[in-house]
Amino acid sequence: MSFQSMCAGAVAVSIGAAASATTLSYPGFSDTTGLTLSGASSVVDNGIDGDVVRLASEDANAGSFFASGLVSINTFQAEFSFRITDVGGISDLSGQVGADGLAFVVQNEGVDALGGSGSGIGYSGIRPSLVIEFDTFFNSPTDPDSNHIGIVVSDGGPLTTVETASVTEQFDNGELWNARVTYDGTTLTVFAAPDGNDLLTPVVTVDDLELLTILGSNSAFVGFTASTAGAFGNHDIVSFSYVPTPGAAVGLAFGAAAICTRRRRSE
């Protein structure tokens, strides 16, 4: 079997699983069957990773994509890779350019949900929701700095930031970043690191998080948002996998994603 066939097969297997076991696996995005893209989102070849979903760029301010069907959120593990390139525009309060960031979103507004651009990172206004934002622009007084992970929730009311954690290395440095989000029914844990580094140490953890109460259901739409404004950058999702009950399957899916991504980069 060819490398291309192997990657395509991984997507096909995951789509079949999604229909029956609500698992998702996208080692790449040459095939977006099972996803709903909204706003500025489109599939492009970024010249590094092959086909990616570009959520936002200099000329396109806000975009999202979500799995087209509901998935279980009782417990889950999500893993994804992203790359932010070609940053520019105005500087933030710390002198950094590039904006505004991207977010992994679990929500029950709808499959085509899309929030505001700029500091809204494409998720503002999506309610109810759980948001894990990778924020690259310092908006005072809501942000701690120019590069951080934030946990934001809404039970249908205003969005509330419950935790933030600063990250030293810039998310928009052009490198491939890997992230993992786990939820065991009460504790949400987020890992993130540049490609080639192990995801062993959590960046942020939130205890006593009741998603059933927040979202009003044990199922939801999962996906991503991003936005730009006076500052900008290409916000690309390179790979994505989601498994309602953490286990070996997600590791295999993400391993396939990493192999496919690295092979494409070397060709």
Image (cartoon, rainbow, N blue to C red):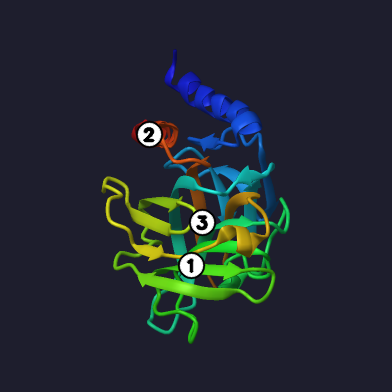
Q: What residue is pinned by disc 1?
A: 151
Q: What residue is pinned by disc 3?
A: 235
Horizontal side of residue 152 vs 191, given as left or right: right
Residue name at image x 51 percent, y 75 percent: 161
Residue 61 visible in the displayed image: no
Q: Residues within 10 Å of mark 2 (few under 14, many from 20)?
A: few
Q: Earlier in the sequence, mark 2 or mark 3?
A: 3
Residue name at image x 50 percent, y 36 percent: 28
In this picture, is 249 found above or below 222?
A: above
Any mark on residue 255, and which? 2
Circle 2 — which element?
A: helix
Q: Amino acid at mark 1?
A: Ile
Dot in front, 1 or 3: 1
Q: Are marks 1 and 3 in contact (CB under 8 Å)?
A: no
In this picture, is 69 found above or below 206?
A: above
- Image quarter of the N terminus: top left
Horizontal side of residue 202 vs 242, given as left or right: left
Gap between marks 1 and 3 measured at Cα: 19 Å
Q: Amino acid at mark 2?
A: Gly
